Image (cartoon, rainbow, N blue to C red):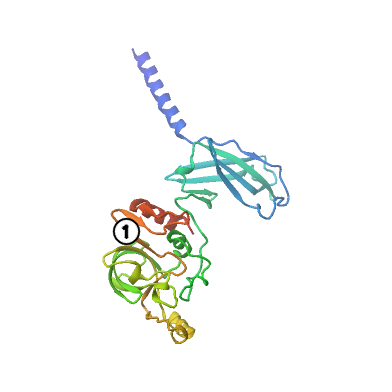
Amino acid sequence: MKKYLLISILLAFLAVSCSEREQEPDAPSVSFTPCRQTKASSAELSGRVEVEFTNAGVQITHYDFEVTCDFTAVNVTHTFVNGVLSLAQQGSPNKADCVCYTDVSYTIDGISQEEVNVIFINGEQVYCGERVHCYENVHALPDVPQSVGFCERQFSFLEAVTRYHLLEDVYIIKGIALDAYEYGRNIMLIEDLKGNFPENISTFIAWGDGFGSIESARFINLAVDFEEQDILILILTTFDDRLAKLWESLRYYELFGIPFHEKPGDMRIAGCSTSVLKYSDGLVTGNISRKGERSINWDEFVERLQGIFIFCK
């Protein structure tokens, strides 16, 4: 009886151990080119990482990956948690003092494009999915009121977030539209989505942006484009003394009869972009993304917004 009991326990232990091992990610089969003393790839491909999703999984090709001259293999390990695929690549044995370059290719099996938000290789971000797309960050908002001719183009809301969210004086909030004044509106703060809005401000004036021969020619006229009690999501920045002097020097009112009511300390929406979306009945509507999305649910919008804050650096 004891013999059978010991066998049963042993089998149970082996079953658990095998189950745990099966949950560990398998190391992919890695192919690589011979060691090169210089970067042989074209300037366009040098250091570039290509990501392609296939029926098998996600295929990675890393051009001009730096290894030591004694390498005989490239080892790749990975983790995949909450849409984040983290890859570690290292040449082996990795003991020589000199370096060379190789093109590395491998596939991580069983991962679809819909599951992946972002991919890192050795801590460097190499891919952002459609749900968290990163555009080029900029160091400053456009200073002058925006016209169609001045702007490169009108950026979507999420494009503008990725371009401007690292700036300290850029705020992303949810608020209720109150009474209108000229091309602006008073806004009552509901939620600070970025987490840096001044704590002592609950109701404030926000000005639309753009200019033209008539007020309605502005890119976004908060008084005309929205109604009282609308719930809005806005990208805002502060109108400061420097901008006040700059705008005064442009003499728009003197030359063209175009008034400006902004005062230092006021909030204005970010220029050259769709900086305002509307929220109603659980849906966010407007020019949301570069893909032309016009409506998504609130939870998905917040998820994508937070993804930009975390991954787009």
Residue at x-position 28% and y-position 54%: 281
> x, y (%) of residue 292?
45, 55
Where is 273 relative to 54, above or below?
below
- On the picture, is 69 further left or further right than 82? right
Q: Tell me the residue that label 1 is attached to.
A: 279
Q: Which type of secondary structure does the marked residue at label 1 adopt?
A: strand
Question: Of 104 and 13, which appears nearest the observer?
Answer: 104
Q: Image quadrant of residue 171?
A: bottom left
Asked if residue 9 shows in the view, the reply is yes
Along the horizontal axis of the image, is 142 left or right of 75? left
Give coordinates of residue 291: x percent, y percent: 47, 53
Task: Indicate the amino acid at tag 1.
Answer: Tyr
Q: Is residue 253 above or below residue 128?
A: below
Relative to 11, say whether 265 is above or below.
below
Q: Is residue 191 visible?
A: no
> Residue lying furthest top in this view?
1
The residue shown at (35%, 56%) is 284
Instruction: Specify the quadrant that holds the N terminus.
Output: top left
Name the residue at the bottom extreme.
254
Q: Position of residue 231 (x, y in %)?
A: 30, 62
Along the line of sight, the residue nearer the viewer: 264 or 293:
293
Q: Is residue 1 above or below residue 310?
A: above
User: 177 or 223: which is nearer to us?
Assistant: 223
